[in-house]
Image (spheres, rainbow, N blue to C red):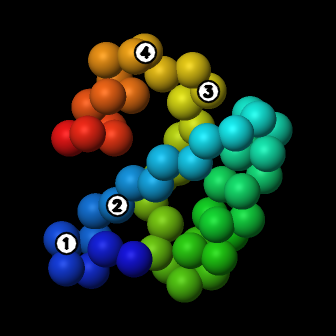
Amino acid sequence: MAFGIGGKCYMVVAGDVSDVNNAVTVASESAGEKGLLVYRSVIPRPHEAMWRQMVEG
């Protein structure tokens, strides 16, 4: 997913927390099978400033 930047990656997934958790679980299982997953985290309600930083950079 992010080989060009040294393997660092993050994804922004929005929606109901349960749906996001399910999506992250499925993606993590797939990445884990390939040995590509180091850590995963779901932040249910990020602070507005954090959200802006993640989305806008």
Residue topped by disc 2: 9
- The answer to whether the residue labelled 1 contacts the one labelled 2, judged by CB atoms less than 8 Å apart, is no
Density class for disc 1 (Cα within 10 Å; few <14, some 14-19, many ≥20) is few
CA distance for labels 4 and 3: 10 Å
In the rendered image, which residue does mark 3 sit on? Answer: 44
Residue where numbered disc 1 is placed: 6
Neighbourhood count class around disc 3 (C-alpha, 10 Å): few under 14, some 14–19, many 20 upward = few
Amino acid type, residue under disc 3 in the picture: Pro
Mark closest to the chain's N terminus, 3 or 2: 2
Tag in front: 3 or 1: 3
Helix, strand or loop at label 2? It is loop
Q: Which amino acid does label 1 sit on?
A: Gly
Q: How far apart are the alpha carbons under marks 3 and 1?
A: 27 Å
The amino acid beneath tag 4 is His
Under tag 3, what secondary structure? Answer: loop
User: Answer yes or no: do the residues labelled 3 and 2 have beta carbons within 8 Å?
Assistant: no
Picture coordinates of residue 44 (x, y %)? 61, 27
